[in-house]
C-alpha cells in the first residue's frame, strides 16, 4: 500500500526566510474568499472609479479568491519591503518636478519578484512538489486586503496599507502556495486611524472619500501615471510629475520611521537636482538611459512632459 505524505508549510520558517531575503514584514494567511473586500471593491468600481482602466474591471473575482488564480491554493504569504528614503518627505513647499520616492529606485517589481522566488526555491528544497506562484502587481490579487488578512496592518483613510512598523512606505509582494501551513497569522483587527483625518485634509484634489476609498479620477498618482487618465478641470498636479505622496507625508505613522536598507531600494537619482528645463530638454534615449530601470520607464518621458504642461 502506498502512503500519501502531506507536507505542511512551517509558518516560523516562512517568517525566517522572508527576513533572510530582506523583507521588512511578512504574514501568512489562510486562503479563503474575501467576500467583504470583494463587495467594497465592487461598490468602488460601480461609482465609476475604474472608468478608463480596463484592467480594473477584469478578473475581479480572482482578486479576492486566490484559488481562482492558482488551482489548489491554500496559503497566501504577504511580504512587505520598506522603501522610505530621504526624498519621501524632502520636497520644499512649492517644489515642482516632484517624483514619488518609490520611483527613484530600481523598479521594485524586479527586486520583490526575485526575493519571492528565492523564498519559493528554498521552500521547494524542503518539498519539491510545492505548487504556487509569486505576484508583484502582475496578477489581479487584492494585495492590501491580503496584507490585512495576513496581519500586517490596516487600510487607512487614504486607502493604503498602514503598518505600525513602517507606516505606509511599504511595497508588497505575495506568494500563493498550494500547501497548508501548520499555523497562520491572525488577521489585523482594529483601526489605527482613530479620529485622525490628516490625509483627507492634505489631498490637493479632495480625492479621498469618507469610506476609505479614493476617487481615482481625481488622484494625482493616477493622473500622472496612467495613460488613459484625463485631468478634471478643477484638479491640480501640485508639482508632481510621477505619483503623489501628499496623503502619506502627513500620516503620523510615517513620522520617525527607519530608512530602507535594501540596496536596490535606495534612490538611484534625486529629482530635486533635476530642473523642469532639464526634463523638457531630455531625449527619449537619455530618459531610457537614466530612468530605464526605474518605475518611471512604464509611463515614459512623454507622460513627464505632459505633467509639466498640465502644471503650467
Ligand atoms: S496620492 Fe495625492 S492626489 Fe491621490 S489621494 Fe493621495 S494626496 Fe490625494
Ligand atoms: S493620516 Fe491619519 S487617517 Fe490618514 S491613514 Fe494616516 S492615521 Fe489614518
Image (cartoon, rainbow, N blue to C red):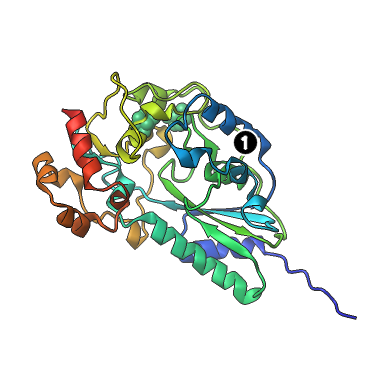
- x%, y% of residue 67? 67, 52
Circle 1 sits on which residue? 38
Location of the N terminus by quadrant is bottom right
- Ligand 1 sits in quadrant: top left
- The residue lying at 35 percent from left, 25 percent from top is 203
- The residue lying at 24 percent from left, 28 percent from top is 238
- x%, y% of residue 254? 39, 39
In the image, 66 versus 86, the foreground residue is 66
In the image, 216: left or right of 7?
A: left
Q: Secondary structure at mark 1?
A: helix
- x%, y% of residue 187? 64, 43
Above or below: residue 44 compared with residue 255: above
Location of the C terminus by quadrant is top left
Extreme residue toward the bottom, this view: 1
- The residue lying at 19 percent from left, 53 percent from top is 287
In the image, 306: left or right of 72?
A: left
In the image, 33: left or right of 215?
A: right
In the image, 92 versus 105, the foreground residue is 105
- x%, y% of residue 182? 72, 60
Amino acid at each position: 500500500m502506498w502512503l500519501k505524505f502531506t507536507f505542511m508549510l512551517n509558518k516560523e520558517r516562512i517568517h525566517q526566510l522572508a527576513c533572510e531575503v530582506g523583507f521588512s514584514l511578512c504574514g501568512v494567511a489562510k486562503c479563503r474568499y474575501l467576500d467583504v473586500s470583494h463587495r467594497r471593491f465592487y461598490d468602488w468600481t460601480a461609482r465609476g472609479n475604474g472608468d478608463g482602466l480596463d484592467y480594473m474591471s477584469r478578473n475581479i473575482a480572482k482578486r479576492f479568491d486566490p484559488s481562482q488564480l492558482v488551482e489548489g491554493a491554500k496559503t497566501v504569504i504577504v511580504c512587505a519591503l520598506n522603501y522610505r528614503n530621504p526624498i519621501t518627505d524632502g520636497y520644499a513647499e512649492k517644489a515642482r518636478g516632484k517624483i514619488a520616492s518609490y520611483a527613484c529606485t530600481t523598479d521594485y517589481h524586479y527586486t520583490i519578484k526575485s526575493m519571492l522566488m528565492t523564498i519559493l526555491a528554498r521552500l521547494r528544497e524542503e518539498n519539491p512538489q510545492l505548487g504556487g506562484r509569486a505576484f508583484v502587481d502582475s496578477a489581479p490579487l487584492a494585495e492590501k486586503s491580503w496584507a490585512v488578512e495576513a496581519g500586517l496592518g490596516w487600510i487607512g483613510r487614504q486607502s493604503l496599507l498602514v503598518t505600525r512598523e513602517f507606516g505606509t512606505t511599504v511595497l508588497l509582494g505575495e506568494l500563493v502556495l498550494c500547501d497548508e501551513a501548520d499555523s497562520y497569522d491572525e488577521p489585523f483587527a482594529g483601526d489605527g486611524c482613530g479620529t485622525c483625518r490628516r490625509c483627507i485634509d492634505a489631498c490637493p484634489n479632495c480625492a479621498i472619500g469618507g469610506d476609505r476609498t479614493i476617487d481615482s479620477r481625481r488622484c494625482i498618482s493616477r493622473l500622472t501615471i496612467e495613460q488613459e487618465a484625463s485631468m478634471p478641470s478643477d484638479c491640480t498636479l501640485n508639482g508632481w510629475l510621477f505619483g503623489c505622496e501628499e496623503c502619506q507625508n502627513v500620516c503620523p505613522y510615517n513620522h520617525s520611521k527607519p530608512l530602507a536598507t535594501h540596496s536596490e531600494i535606495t534612490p538611484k537619482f534625486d529629482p530635486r537636482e533635476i530642473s523642469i528645463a532639464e526634463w523638457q530638454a531630455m531625449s527619449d534615449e537619455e530618459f531610457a538611459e537614466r530612468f530605464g530601470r526605474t518605475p518611471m520607464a512604464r509611463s515614459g518621458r512623454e507622460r513627464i512632459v505632459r505633467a509639466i504642461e498640465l502644471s503650467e
